[in-house]
Image (cartoon, rainbow, N blue to C red):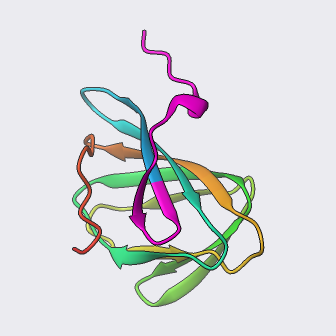
């Protein structure tokens, strides 16, 4: 069993005000911990991985193929493989959540 505390996650700033860190990576999937600061934008991107996630705290606006989808604390989401998506934090507080990617994703390139 792997045991990782969120306090020990090494967060990388992948875009200004957008932080991502690995919680756990297995053979079939990886789990990410993310934080998006107020006013920050996760650039629109796509990847081969299916992505499901959960908003632990705060609010985001997901941008999916040009459509805006509000995500609130307690909401779950899914992005199919190759779906173009991004997010903006238009609130006054950080948004924090979890994302699971299958197959595992270890080295994201946010400019794709």
Q: Quadrant of residue 93?
A: bottom right
Residue positioned most to the top: 1
Location of residue 111 with respect to 76 vertically, above or below: below
Name the residue located 67 percent from the left edge and 73 percent from the top edge.
38
The quadrant the C terminus occupies is: bottom left
Q: Is residue 83 visible?
A: yes
Where is residue 43? Give x, y as percent. Answer: 40, 77
Location of residue 85 with respect to 10 vertically, above or below: below
Name the residue located 40 percent from the left edge and 85 percent from the top edge.
65
Where is residue 22? Give x, y as percent. Answer: 40, 38
Q: Is residue 84 visible?
A: no
> Which residues fall within the magenta stretch?
1-19
Name the residue located 35 percent from the left edge and 62 percent from the top edge.
80
Where is residue 12? Give x, y as percent. Answer: 41, 52
Q: Quadrant of residue 10?
A: top left
Name the residue located 31 percent from the left edge and 43 percent from the top edge.
102
Q: Is residue 9 magenta?
A: yes
Q: Quadrant of residue 92?
A: bottom right
The quadrant the N terminus occupies is: top left
Q: In the image, 31: left or right of 96?
A: left
Q: Nearer the viewer, residue 21 or 29?
A: 21
Q: In the image, 84: left or right of 60?
A: left
């Amino acid at each position: 069993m792997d045991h990782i505390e969120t306090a020990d996650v090494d967060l990388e700033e992948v875009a200004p005000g957008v932080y991502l860190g690995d919680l756990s990576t297995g053979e079939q999937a990886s789990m990410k911990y993310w934080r998006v600061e107020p006013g920050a934008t996760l650039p629109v991107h796509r990847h081969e991985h299916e992505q499901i996630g959960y908003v632990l705290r705060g609010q985001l606006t997901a941008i999916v193929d040009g459509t805006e989808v509000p995500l609130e604390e307690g909401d779950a989401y899914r992005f199919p493989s190759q779906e173009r998506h991004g997010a903006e934090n238009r609130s006054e507080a950080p948004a924090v959540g979890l994302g699971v990617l299958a197959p595992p994703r270890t080295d994201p390139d946010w400019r794709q």
